[in-house]
Amino acid sequence: MKIGFIGLGIMGKPMSKNLLKAGYSLVVLDRNQEAVAEVVAAGAVAAQSASEVAGQVDVIITMLPNSPHVKEVVLGEGGVIEGAKAGTVVIDMSSIAPLASREIAAALAEKQILMLDAPVSGGEPKAIDGTLSVMVGGDKAIFDRYYDLLKSMAGSVVHTGDIGAGNVTKLANQVIVALNIAAMSEALVLATKAGVDPELVFQAIRGGLAGSTVLEAKAPMVLDRNFKPGFRIDLHIKDLANALDTSHGVGAQLPLTAAVMEMMQALKQDDLGTADHSALACYYEKLAKVEVKRH
Ligand SMILES: NC(=O)c1ccc[n+]([C@@H]2O[C@H](COP(=O)([O-])OP(=O)(O)OC[C@H]3O[C@@H](n4cnc5c(N)ncnc54)[C@H](O)[C@@H]3O)[C@@H](O)[C@H]2O)c1
Ligand SMILES: O=C(O)[C@H](O)CO
């Protein structure tokens, strides 16, 4: 099967390489020509525009930063909608606003182009290993048809409802991840300030009830002072903004999410927007005038 893949960033590059390894033929596009060259060297063919990608394939995967990027690439001038024939399927794996997914799907439906929203969790390490968690919204029959394709990049692929449900699920994921990193940061700063080695605290608690995937992935980054993304604070601000917007629309209250959003915005003001979201620890460190690190 020939697949289009648009967006070869931190996540899209390893995901596209896993599709090549699984035997799919790929037509790829990104603004970053270095990323394109790397995936072409692994066996893909490059295209010059999204409409050119769409003209050569039956399925197009997008892995772009946010709603405006997906709208531009799919519906804009030279976009997917201009090159795709009726029956083509767009699988948007970016994390975008659920409302935007529904709007893009409705515009595509006017040309009989189908869509799934299929955002992912697991970060760069799981994108490389092909063990991402994929959460999918859209027609169940289309989900079933493309389950194997998605599974070749993932450890789990779960259909959570109609179009937009994938991104609602991803917002729930992002709330949990943000609050977990905040809790971890708060705890490690407390221990450090109280004179206990944070590395020993991590070793002591990781097997207990406080242990988590977030603690395993992010505590070592804080202890090593390694804030290379990973997942940028800027992108997490985007997700929390989408979560807060969605919560207002549906009448849910997210007081902890709102608090962590303010912390992330303060870090962006301190020029940490491009740092990994584990740099949330720096917010607490600044308040407590202490640094969490291995002794
Ligand atoms: N990084 C993570 O750990 C992670 C994990 C899960 C989900 N996500 C989500 O996945 C999506 C992608 O994240 P990422 O970290 O790979 O971002 P990234 O910024 O590394 O990659 C985005 C890519 O899209 C390309 N791009 C942007 N606009 C384009 C356009 N108009 N035409 C062609 N290419 C264009 C960029 O050049 C870049 O290579 C985001 O929605 C993010 O929230 C990221
Ligand atoms: O779940 C994840 O992979 C991170 O929170 C980035 O989206």
Image (cartoon, rainbow, N blue to C red):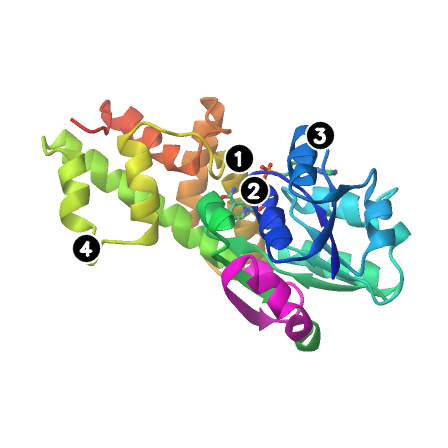
Number of residues whose C-alpha sits closer than 10 Å to that of mark 1, classed few (under 14), some (14–19) or many (20 or more)? some
Number of residues whose C-alpha sits closer than 10 Å to that of mark 2, classed few (under 14), some (14–19) or many (20 or more)? some
Nearest-to-viewer mark from 4 and 1: 4
Question: Which quarter of the frame holds ligand 1?
Answer: top right
Decide which of tag 3 and tag 2 comes sooner along the chain.
3
Decide which of tag 2 and tag 4 comes sooner along the chain.
4
Secondary element type, mark 4: loop
Secondary element type, mark 3: helix
- In this picture, which residue range is highlighted in magenta? 143-168
Q: Which mark is residue 234?
A: 1
Q: Which mark is residue 238?
A: 2
Q: Residue at x 56, y 64 (%)?
A: 151
Q: How far apart, in angstroms, are the residues tagged by discs 3 and 1?
A: 23 Å
Judging depth in this view, the residue of 283 and 20 nearest the camera is 20
Q: How far apart, in angstroms, are the residues tagged by discs 2 and 1?
A: 6 Å
Q: Which residue is mark 4?
A: 207
The amino acid at mark 2 is Lys
The amino acid at mark 3 is Gln
Secondary element type, mark 1: helix
Q: Which mark is residue 33?
A: 3
Task: Residue 232: give x, y in percent of width and height.
Answer: 50, 35
